[in-house]
Image: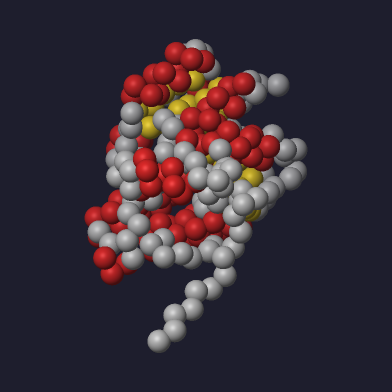
Amino acid sequence: MHTKTVLITGATSGFGAAAVDRFVSGGWRVIATGRRADRLQALVQRHGSDKVHALVFDMRDEDAMRAAIADLPPEFASIDLLLNNAGLALGTAPAQQADLQQWKQMIDTNVTALVTITHLLLPALIERRGAIVNISSIAGTYPYKGGNVYGGSKAFVSQFSQNLRADLHGTGVRVTSIEPGMAETEFTLVRTGGDQRASDQLYAGVHPITAADIAESVWWVATLPPHLNINRLEVMPVNQSAAGLQVHRD
């Protein structure tokens, strides 16, 4: 039995940071990526450099991504699981009032960066009969006002996951799309430019999903017997459900 290794993108907060803790506690080595070096270093200090290796780069910088992965130390170089967690939502305005640059940043991060690192690691994952877990969102299934490009980007992630499954048929590589609903992390703070009041109001009384909940879900998927694949896993708080269609009356 070899020690398995997971590469987790967006490991500086939320689902990613919680997943680092969960996989280390389960005996895995973790490659943690993100832009905030201080937060990554805190993970290394908490768990030890033999358990966590930090890669500091912006997911939108393909050259930096490639260089960082190419320079992995030998003990972290054999990757068994790619957890595509890095992503963000920006803005809550309807499409006709939205900031085009925010749209482009969401696409660059949630779509382009995700497919880039996936393509980069596919040969190694195939060789090791590994797994890919993509963090999507219920926003890719259920539209809502202000969701526009964020929802579109997550719909891409969900469909890309299923098409990867089709293409990787026969390789032994497992692919899962995990699609959370309301989860209280830094998500809304990022989306609203740091508005803590907006975040508090959104989650008040909901008993929302926590980062640890999703980390546990990823762990469950990753540690199933290798002949089982979870295609999609949609997770909501009990206090959230699909709201149905809106109707405007003149």
Which quarter of the figure has residue 220? top right
In this figure, which colouring scheme has been used for the structure? secondary structure
Q: Residue at x 68, y 49 (%)?
A: 230
Whether residue 67 is visible, yes or no, is no
**Whole-percent x, y for residue 65 in the image:** 35, 36
Q: Quadrant of the C terminus?
A: bottom left
Q: Is residue 120 above or below residue 47?
A: below
Left/right placement of residue 121 relative to residue 39 reads right
Q: Residue at x 50, y 45 (%)?
A: 204
Q: Quadrant of the N terminus?
A: top right
**Whole-percent x, y for residue 23 in the image:** 59, 27
Whether residue 111 is visible, yes or no, is yes
Count the marks: how many? 0
Left/right placement of residue 95 relative to residue 21 reads left
Q: Residue at x 75, y 43 (%)?
A: 227
Near-viewer residue (93 or 30) = 93
Which quarter of the figure has residue 32? top left
Near-viewer residue (48 or 123) = 48
Q: Tell which residue pokes out farthest to the bottom in this image.
A: 250
Q: Residue at x 74, y 45 (%)?
A: 228
**Whole-percent x, y for residue 223 in the image:** 69, 34
**Whole-percent x, y for residue 170 in the image:** 67, 50
Left/right placement of residue 235 relative to residue 159 reads right
Q: Is residue 6 above or below residue 152?
A: above
